[in-house]
Amino acid sequence: MSEALPTNTADNTADAAAHRAEKADAEGRLTQLYTMSRTAGMTNQEYVAVNPMAIVAVLLGLISALAFLAPLLLLIPAVAVFFSVLAIRQINDSNQTQTGKALAWLGLLIALACGLGTAGILIADGIRSSADEKEISKTIAEVGRLLKAGDYPAAYEHFDPVFQERWKLADFTRTWEAIKAAAGGPVEKFEWNQVPPIASSAGGARLAHTKVLMKFPKGAEDRYDIALRESGSKWRVIDLPSFFFVDRRKKAGDDFNLDPTGR
């Protein structure tokens, strides 16, 4: 019995060593599989896919230029930015199994350029329109004040040279005197109705078509068409068709189309 103990101890030692070897081999296999999953696509480029969101982003970025045509189309660059950011995040989280980051960045930059450019134009136009409306309101209010006071020569100075070529000061004065007699007195109210003017251009000049609120002693308040033309930093009245009728069939030498529809 005393001689068998060394043999059993040797067997136990051999079994433990074998168990440790098997455990080490299993851990090695797991490490190898983990390494392969982390580096998939790194050694064989044909398995690296282009992120589909990156393709969508660059396509939307290219058509973002349409935003310059209409403010509503600013939605396109906004969507392009969303897809670009989404694509970049997906590519970063793909463990290098996806590509296309350059496309996503290109779409993002184009979309930002188009979106910010369009927004800048809209802001500039808004500032200019606000300044134009202020000057138009000022001109109309001054004409009304002078007409109410019966100072026709001063009011006439706020009318455009094109109007003055058609209607001389004598005609202008006679017309307003006739209106005054028929209406029971001078105009009581002559002011802009606050509706944004319809802008147009003709002969290289900017025109504005809007409405003026007028009231006479014998009549109710009503709206009348009025057109103004930009002259330097000021706006002057170029047409008041309800009171100074121009036969559209006789426009020889007239370079200005006062109809905002272009007809």
Image (cartoon, rainbow, N blue to C red):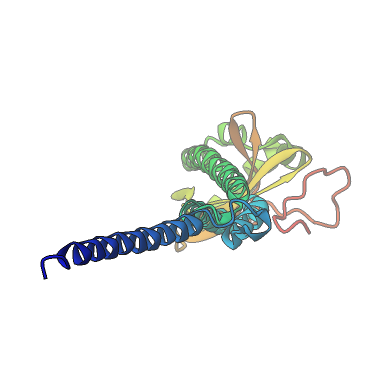
Residue 200 visible here: yes
Q: In this view, does 6 lie to the left or right of 91?
A: left
Residue extending farthest to the right is 252
At which x and y percent is residue 142?
49, 37
Q: Is residue 182 at least partly visible in the picture?
A: no
User: In terms of depth relative to the viewer, which is nearer, 13 or 112?
Assistant: 13
Q: Quadrant of the N terminus?
A: bottom left
Picture residue at 50% right of the left edge, 39% below the top = 127
Residue under the point 69% across and 38% down:
170
Q: Position of residue 253 (x, y in %)?
A: 87, 42
In which quadrant will I find the C terminus? bottom right
Q: Which residue is drawn at 64% across and 37% down?
A: 159
* In this rendering, position of residue 132 left or right of residue 255: left
Q: Can you say whether 2 is above or below 62 in the image? A: below
Q: Residue furthest bottom?
A: 1
Q: Nearer the viewer, residue 105 or 156?
A: 105
User: Looking at the rendering, which quadrant does residue 80 occupy?
Assistant: bottom right
Q: Nearer the viewer, residue 192 or 240?
A: 192
Residue 155, how many percent across, how many down?
57, 36
Which residue is most to the left? 2
- Count of numbered marks: 0
Residue 68, percent from left and from top: 64, 49
- Determine whether 239 is above or below 204 in the image: below
